[in-house]
Image (spheres, rainbow, N blue to C red):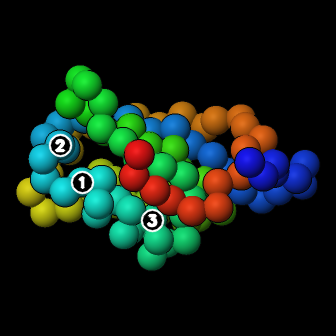
Amino acid sequence: MKKLSANHAIETVSVRITGHVQGVGFRAAAVRQAHAMKIAGWVRNNADSSVEAVLQGPHEQVDRMLSWLLTGPPGARVAAVESQEMHTERYFDRFEQI
């Protein structure tokens, strides 16, 4: 695990997406979108049918990824996206599906 420097300009956000977001390729599409936006972190399904993610990157890119999550891929019907800034020293070097 790499640690973030004290002077980093990187934001880390925890996200929970609800609605019809499982079984529609949401995680795979999120990985593709995150790679395109140069976002690091991870995405996974939860037992309650929601999708959870951690996004890490510059504020503008994280904000753009959050906007994409409001719609998701074709076939998804997003009801809500809840996000909260996380304070972490962990540095993610890629975005992956877990």
Q: What amino acid is labelled 2 in the image?
A: Gln
The residue sitting at 46% across, 56% down in the picture is 96
Q: What amino acid is labelled 3 in the image?
A: Ala
Please state which of residues 40 and 79 is positioned toward the viewer in this rendering.
40
Q: Mark 1 points at which residue?
A: 26
Please state which of residues 68 and 21 is positioned toward the viewer in this rendering.
21
Query: Is disc 3 placed on a helix, strand or loop?
Result: helix
**Mark 1–mark 3 distance (CA, rounded to whole Å):** 12 Å
Query: Is disc 2 placed on a helix, strand or loop?
Result: loop
Q: Which of marks 3 and 2 is nearer the N terminus?
A: 2
- On the picture, is 56 further left or further right than 91? left
**How far from the left and from the top, in percent, is residue 79?**
20, 38
**How far from the left and from the top, in percent, is residue 72?**
25, 57
Q: Tell me if mark 3 has few (under 14), some (14-19) or many (20+) residues whose alpha carbon lies within 10 angstroms of its own.
A: many
- On the picture, is 19 further left or further right than 51? left
Is residue 66 depicted above or below 78 in this figure? below
Q: Mark 2 points at which residue?
A: 22
**How far from the left and from the top, in percent, is residue 61?**
55, 65
Q: What amino acid is labelled 1 in the image?
A: Phe
The residue sitting at 38% across, 68% down in the picture is 33
Q: Name the residue under label 3.
A: 34
The residue sitting at 88% across, 53% down in the picture is 5
- On the picture, is 87 further left or further right than 69? right
Quarter residue 7 falls in: bottom right
**Mark 3–mark 2 distance (CA, rounded to whole Å):** 18 Å
Is residue 61 visible in this depiction of the protein?
yes
